[in-house]
Amino acid sequence: MTSRSKIPRPTVKRLSLYLRDLESRREQEQQTISSQQLGDALGLTDAQVRKDLAYFGQFGHPGIGYHVQELIAELRKIFGTDRKWSAAVVGAGNIGRAVMAYPRFRHKGFEIVAVFDNNPGVIGQVISGHRVRPMDDLPALVGARDIKIGILAVPAETAQAVADALIDAGVLGILNFAPVRLDVRDAVSITSVDFSVALEQLAFQVSLGLTGSLDEQEG
Amino acid sequence: MTSRSKIPRPTVKRLSLYLRDLESRREQEQQTISSQQLGDALGLTDAQVRKDLAYFGQFGHPGIGYHVQELIAELRKIFGTDRKWSAAVVGAGNIGRAVMAYPRFRHKGFEIVAVFDNNPGVIGQVISGHRVRPMDDLPALVGARDIKIGILAVPAETAQAVADALIDAGVLGILNFAPVRLDVRDAVSITSVDFSVALEQLAFQVSLGLTGSLDEQEG
DNA sequence: CGTTGTGAAATGATTCACAGCT
DNA sequence: AGCTGTGAATCATTTCACAACG
């Protein structure tokens, strides 16, 4: 383990954008890329790109730029996406279904190996190739199928209880789609995706007449 | 227009979290709240909460705190959520369906008034009460139904083309679910929701053994 | 040359700490 | 007393600018 100085949070958030862009360039057979090019594509400065990458190692070649293929491999190592994570979807409603049908999950190194719901009308159904199981089966299956990630697609009211169940069962991370802040007693990693917060951001930007994206520099 | 100093981007992102928390407190009949209480619930310091709110006006009452009801009203004004926005969903696949079924949209002041897709097998179907229309109808309907917001739920490959169509038709904002950066020539506001980026964030945090959320301070 | 990696400077955001109001 | 609003201080992130390298 190379002793690396603390990584800024914004850097972590940009890393996956780099990877996404690089993967599409590789498909188009692009061999190398400069920090300038990568920055332009993402609305960042060249210095920012270089500094972000430099937190993790020296991947560039002076006078040349970065080898696309090589940098993709490095980023995947950083993300831990070079290994596979087993995941469980909890909640087989609309969001749960959209998640199960999302083709990129597998590509990003996640495999959905179980689906849970507590609605008797849904239990037993097969959705996107997965049989929906009752919540009661959760603790046993997390262990049996080596589930590391819980995808929380239940209503806000039950989200905390389900999160607790997932943590007790031993998952390491939770992807939360419910519009609440979960209290996870620092037991797991959490990332949230919140439609209504996103909509409100948008409404706010529109009211103010702001253009472009709040996530970017170019404002 | 009150002359207000520039608002930090992180503040904008927290504003909707405040509103969400306040709304749930009002349901529980809580009358007032201190910056300390609100901060604790969201993992922020009291000073941060006060400073964020102070960018928009003086809503607090020394010795008392903030009146929940009053602050909700102020935040809604700030968000422009006290008016209604007409929205169109483009893409009636899994994500589009989840969006249409999401009950909070209406509550947040958005009304879905049209749904578009270019798949002949889907056109004409009624989903969540909306008849799916061909993409060709988009330009006319955006004008006719006063559509201000486009919700982009199409695959990455077609996202840019659809965004261009929405902009040409005259929308003011786009909520983008496609995993690409859209080039919008600064014509509209953009907010993105990206599942695969979220998953990668999570994978990264888990690999590093980080706990809690990257969006928060408590780290 | 062109391009990286990186200290140093500049900008931006958070926290501190306290005057002032109720 | 309890709590807000806010300048000043601290901390974090970005940008600048340039030596070093292929």
Image: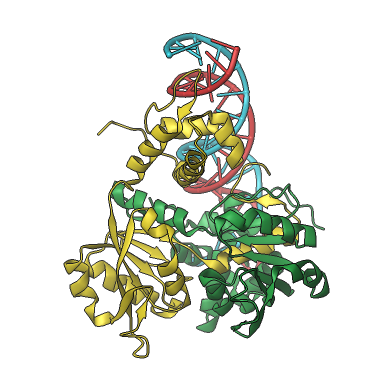
Chain colours: A yellow, B green, C red, D cyan
Q: Nearer the viewer, residue B120 or A14?
A: B120
Q: Nearer the viewer, residue B167 or A152?
A: B167
Q: Looking at the picture, how far across and down is residue B15, in whole percent?
A: 59, 62
Q: Which part of the image, by quadrant, shows the N terminus of chain B?
A: bottom right
Q: Classify A184 as above or below A73.
A: below
Q: Looking at the picture, how far across and down is residue A22, in whole percent?
A: 48, 40
Toward which corner of the image does residue D3 lie, by quadrant?
bottom right
Please tell me how many numbered marks the rendered image carries: 0
Q: Looking at the picture, how far across and down is residue A184, in whole percent?
A: 33, 64
Q: Classify A81 as above or below B44.
A: above
Q: Is residue B33 visible?
A: no
Residue shown at 57%/35% (left/top)?
A39
Q: Classify B45 as above or below A102.
A: above
Toward which corner of the image does residue A198 lie, by quadrant?
bottom right
**Does residue A25 appear left or right of residue A163 in this picture?**
right
Q: Looking at the picture, how far across and down is residue A116, in whole percent?
A: 31, 77
Residue shown at 55%/60% (left/top)?
B155
Toward which corner of the image does residue B88 lie, by quadrant?
bottom right
**Does residue B170 appear left or right of residue A179 in this picture?**
right
